[in-house]
Image: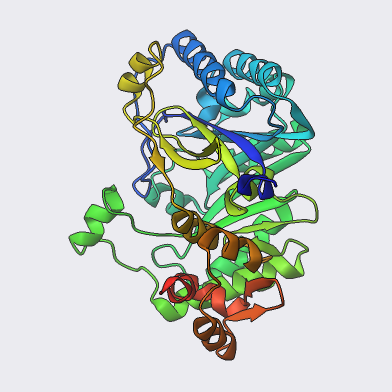
């Protein structure tokens, strides 16, 4: 009998913890430093890859994702050596996807050819806005012109290019977002990630919001209208949403992120990286120490991870539901029942179906377009016992 993770596949996430500047909305594990020892980081990644490969021998690797931070600040030779080692340690899918996140600066764009030669197959670019005033407000250090130039370079080097935009920004009207999104869709190659701005505690934006100084954020009605407009425009342009915040042409879905959303196993390597790993039939939540210096120092004795937390079957069922219902394809209810040891609450499902929030078949439950607007509430209702 196949282990549950095999339904979602197996991937590898590698975290690069450094950025040129810290964005005020960002709560990721990213740091700004003057000097980076690229050789030390290359050797550390190789050591960690070999450690984790011992636990996962024989698994077919479907994707590699260099995230951060800003991985395009990595030396291309470091990226190439890491990719070469990955291919030695695991059997890989014929269509192995290797994504690298990049910022649209001229320095990083100048490395795109070397990244491609080193084995990267896909670029995910953090453009975030097509408006210079909002780029400054978001703490970005590039201009729209620089972003467009870098994007054109990426498109000339890679068959698959995605970029991110943040909407529901301060003072952003429905009309302004419509014009910006139309411009983005004219640029887009095959994939767009479109995120509503969220205010996270512990960020500069969070502090300003708590002090009442972050004005002009949209209310719930405008947020819903912005989301609906986004779905309509992207669908009409041939890039329908396949996940709450992600849109793609046929065949261009992010294979790495699908492993997360379909609740597969994935290794997390690097400071603060999280993973899900099944060993001898037990699935664990893994998390590396977040401080880069502490993580780097711990590589030698292979103690980069915090103590692993075993996940109960109910934990896994809840995570499967949380991740899978983000996808337009929804979840297999039989798989949920196998993990949870019970079916979803029929009263909750019927209630949500009657409200038009979900649709059901014999073996699937999917969230409707209306349901996606209040997805957190839909999931909370289904998780009630």
Is 162 left or right of 291, judged from the image as shown?
right
Q: Answer whether residue 331 is visible to the viewer in this image.
A: no
Q: In the picture, residue 381 is in which quadrant?
A: bottom left
Image quarter (top left, top right, bottom left or bottom right) of the C terminus: bottom left
Work out whether 218 lies above or below 309. Answer: below
Color scheme of the displayed model: rainbow
The x, y position of residue 226, in whole percent, is 53, 72
How many callouts does the rendering have? 0
Residue at 62% across / 77% down in the picture? 368
Q: Quadrant of residue 236?
A: bottom right
Residue nearest the observer in this picture, 16 or 3: 3
**87 displayed left or right of 46:** right
- Specify whether residue 51 is in view: yes
The spot of residue 100 in percent (x, y) is 61, 33
Looking at the image, residue 154 lies above or below residue 148: above
Q: Residue at x 52, y 88 (%)?
A: 351
- Which residue sits furthest bottom? 354
Residue 212: x, y in percent?
Answer: 20, 64
| Residue in the picture at 38% in, 44% down | 139
Q: Is residue 47 above or below residue 29?
A: above
Q: Is residue 120 shown left or right of residue 107?
A: right
Nearest the camera: 381 or 112? 381
Identity of the residue drawn at 23% across and 56% down = 208
**Residue nearer the viewer, 76 or 62:** 62
Residue 90, image x, y percentages: 68, 23
């Amino acid at each position: 009998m196949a282990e549950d993770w095999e339904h979602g596949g197996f991937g590898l996430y590698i975290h690069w913890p450094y950025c040129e500047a810290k964005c005020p909305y960002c709560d990721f594990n990213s740091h700004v430093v003057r000097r980076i020892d690229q050789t030390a980081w290359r050797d550390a990644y190789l050591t960690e890859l070999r450690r984790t490969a011992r636990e996962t021998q024989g698994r077919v690797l479907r994707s590699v994702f260099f995230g951060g931070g800003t991985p395009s600040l990595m030396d291309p030779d470091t990226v190439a050596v890491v990719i070469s080692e990955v291919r030695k340690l695991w059997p890989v899918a014929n269509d192995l996807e290797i994504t690298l996140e990049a910022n649209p600066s001229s320095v990083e764009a100048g490395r795109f050819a070397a990244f491609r030669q080193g084995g990267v197959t896909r670029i995910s670019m953090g453009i975030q806005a097509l408006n210079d005033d909002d780029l400054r407000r978001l703490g970005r250090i590039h201009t729209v012109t620089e972003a467009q130039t870098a994007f054109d370079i990426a498109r000339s080097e890679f068959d698959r290019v995605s970029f991110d935009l943040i909407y529901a920004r301060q003072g952003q009207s429905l009309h302004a977002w419509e014009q910006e999104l139309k411009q983005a869709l004219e640029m887009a190659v095959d994939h767009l990630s479109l995120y509503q701005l969220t205010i996270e505690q512990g960020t500069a934006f969070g502090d300003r919001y708590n002090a009442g100084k972050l004005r002009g954020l949209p209310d719930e009605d405008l947020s819903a209208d912005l989301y609906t407009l986004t779905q309509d425009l992207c669908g009409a342009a041939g890039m329908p949403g396949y996940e709450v915040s992600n849109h793609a042409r046929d065949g261009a879905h992010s294979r790495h992120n699908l492993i997360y959303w379909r609740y597969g196993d994935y290794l997390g390597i690097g400071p603060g990286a999280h993973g899900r790993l099944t060993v001898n039939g037990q699935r664990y939540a893994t998390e590396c120490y977040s401080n880069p210096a502490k993580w780097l120092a711990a590589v030698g004795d292979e103690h980069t991870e915090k103590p692993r937390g075993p996940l109960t079957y109910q934990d896994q069922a809840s995570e499967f539901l949380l991740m899978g219902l983000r996808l337009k394809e929804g979840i297999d209810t039989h798989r949920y029942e196998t993990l949870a040891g019970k079916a979803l609450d029929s009263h909750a499902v019927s209630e949500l179906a009657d409200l038009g929030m979900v649709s059901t078949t014999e073996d699937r439950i999917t969230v409707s377009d209306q349901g996606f607007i209040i997805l957190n509430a839909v999931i909370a209702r289904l998780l009630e016992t």
